[in-house]
Amino acid sequence: MRTFVTLLASIAAILSSAIVTYAQNPVPKASDVLAKYGEVEGWTVYTNQTRGDCLIVRDYGLGSVQMGVTPADREVGYLGVFSKADIGLKNGAKSEVFVSIGGNLYGGLATSTHGELKGGYSGGYITTDSPSFKRDVAKKYEMIVFPETAGTFAVDLKGTYKAMAMGRKCLKH
């Protein structure tokens, strides 16, 4: 549980430098119809047939990392981390998080979501329009969550560049 909370904080940090306020939850709802678009280097790309957008997903153990763009403004990206473990989240709660990618530190607010996702997942997401963050997530190979703290852990970013490219291609269809 601590690892998931740490990961959630890391991701939020990564996505922000310039965190964007987004009124609608960009994460697909349980009722959304998702169709598999393709796979690349451990990532699965889905088209959300309900919203008309696409997302990339990488599963790990009891959890999942998800990235995409907000349906209303495709210039704004989101990063989410979700778990099947009970982590005590309440919908809409916000937590400050920090991550380091390639030596660059990012911080932001993570918004939690609970009970709205397929498969019993709970977690949180952050939104950003920061080109630096997007570039680092795509081009670097590791994200350090909560750098220089006792709860530090690393997230493998292998394949994100190709997965993001496939996600952009999916958006054009």
Image (cartoon, rainbow, N blue to C red):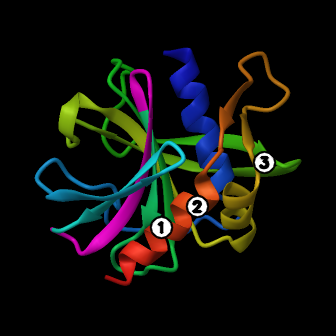
Instruction: Give the Cα distance between marks 2 and 3.
Output: 18 Å
Res. 127 mark: none
Q: Which residue is mark 3?
A: 101
172 w.r.t. 100: above or below: below
Amino acid carrying mark 2 in the image? Lys
Image depth: mark 1 or mark 3 in front: 1
Q: Quadrant of residue 38?
A: bottom left
Task: Point out the residue furthest to the right here.
Answer: 103
Q: Which residue lies at the image location 78% right of the left edge and 48% below the top edge?
A: 101
Res. 162 mark: 2
Q: Which residue is mark 1?
A: 166
148 w.r.t. 118: above or below: above
Where are the magenta residues, as a range? 50-63
Q: Quadrant of the C terminus?
A: bottom left
Q: Under tag 1, what secondary structure? A: helix
Q: Position of residue 153 (x, y in %)?
A: 71, 25
Between 27 and 172, the one nearer to me in the picture: 172
Q: Position of residue 104 (x, y in %)?
A: 85, 52
Q: Which residue lies at the image location 51% right of the left edge and 73% below the top edge?
A: 76
Image depth: mark 2 or mark 3 in front: 2
